[in-house]
Amino acid sequence: MNTDNTKAQMRKGLLEFCVLSLVDEMEMYPSDIIKKLKASQMIVVEGTLYPLLSRLLKAELVNYNWKESTSGPPRKYYQITDGGQKVLEDLTSSWNTLQKAVNKIIKQSK
């Protein structure tokens, strides 16, 4: 069995959670989000991130501010909203529960 697809689907399912977590720390420019995700081995490309940011924006989980750039046009910096923080809290709780359950199953199977 090739596990590449399964691993990609796991990452994809956690991407929204990770992006909300990152913009909860501080407002971020999309390329900075991508760098942080890649550094954490949550491999993502612009073609994946921008539609995700649009969905989060439409759902009012994030918003953005325009900031002047020293090397070009103004840039959008994203930050979490109050609604996004509530969703992040719920996702964090769900993640902790899921992680415990999976770890318990993995340990039992050894």
Image (spheres, rainbow, N blue to C red):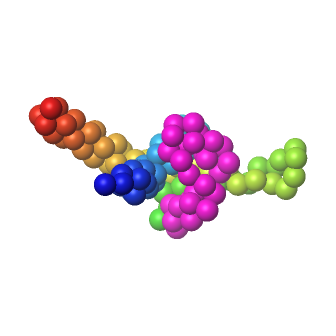
Image coordinates for residue 36, horizontal then vertical, percent: 58, 39
Q: Residue at x 52, y 37 (%)?
A: 40
* Residue 13 at least partly seen: no
- Left or right of 52 in this view: 2: left
Image coordinates for residue 97, horizontal then vertical, percent: 23, 41
* Residue 49 at least partly seen: yes
Q: Is residue 43 magenta?
A: yes
Prevailing secondary structure of the magenta residues? helix
Q: Is residue 39 magenta?
A: yes
Image coordinates for residue 28, horizontal then vertical, percent: 64, 45
Q: Residue at x 27, y 46 (%)?
A: 94
Q: Residue furthest front?
A: 1
Q: Residue at x 81, y 54 (%)?
A: 74
Q: Residue at x 46, y 46 (%)?
A: 18
Which quarter of the image is occupied by the C terminus? Answer: top left
Q: From which residue to which does the magenta span run?
A: 30-58
Q: Residue furthest left?
A: 108
Camera-nearest residue between 59 and 99: 99
- Left or right of 10 in this view: 71: right
Seen in the picture, residue 97 relative to 2 is either above or below; the reply is: above
How many numbered discs?
A: 0
Which quarter of the image is occupied by the N terminus? Answer: bottom left
